[in-house]
Image (spheres, grey):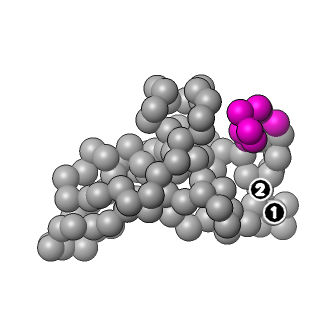
Amino acid sequence: MLFGKSTAEEGYKEADIIVDGKTEQALGGGNCQVSTTVYNAVLASAGLTVTEHHDHGKKVPYIEEGKDATIAYNSLDLKFRNDLPNSIKMYVSTDGITVTVKIVKIS
């Protein structure tokens, strides 16, 4: 996943993040909700292999323990490989509360 630096100029607002197992407020809080949803969509898709993944090391409120995926600019990534003969397309959306990820194979 590619997220740029979380800055106010890019529209980021302060929200909860986890640093060294403790919750604090910072720009970019919420990015991990997207990476977690992408991670679980990849796990549910045949032919995709996770090649880099990091969990929070602490239970997060929006998913079962062990199913989260944390990312941090310039240090922690979520990466996966497409082992299918076809390309894929990823649709990511939100209604302001829920993040939805749909992965489709392009024939």
Magenta region: 17-24
Asked if one can make out residue 99 in the rendered structure from this viewpoint, the answer is: no
Instruction: Please state if 93 lies on the left or on the right of 101 as rendered.
Output: right
Q: Is 16 inside the magenta-drawn segment?
A: no
Give the main secondary structure of the magenta stretch: strand
Report the side of 103 relative to 34 (left or right). Answer: left
Which residue sits at x=18%, y=73%? Answer: 86
Q: Amino acid at mark 2?
A: Tyr
Where is residue 89, by image quadrant? Answer: bottom left
N-term-proximal mark, 1 vs 2: 1
- Residue 56 % position (x, y): 59, 39
Q: Is residue 60 above or below residue 70?
A: above
Of the pair 37 and 24, the residue shown nearer to us: 24
Q: Is 23 above or below relative to 78?
A: above
**Left or right relative to 32: residue 46:** left
Residue contact at pointers 1 and 2, CB within 8 angstroms? yes
Local secondary structure at mark 1: loop
Q: Residue at x 75, y 61 (%)?
A: 6
Q: How far apart are the two marked residues, 1 and 2, measured between alpha carbons?
A: 6 Å
- Residues 20 and 30: in front is 20
Q: Position of residue 47 (x, y in %)?
A: 20, 59
Magenta span has 23? yes
| Residue 43, position as x, y percentages in the image | 31, 46
Percent position (x, y) of residue 36?
A: 49, 44
**What kind of residue is marked 1?**
Thr
Looking at the image, residue 5 lies above or below residue 58 = below
Residue 12 numbered mark, or none: 2
Q: Quadrant of the C terminus?
A: bottom left
Callout 2: SS: loop
Q: Which residue is mark 1?
A: 7
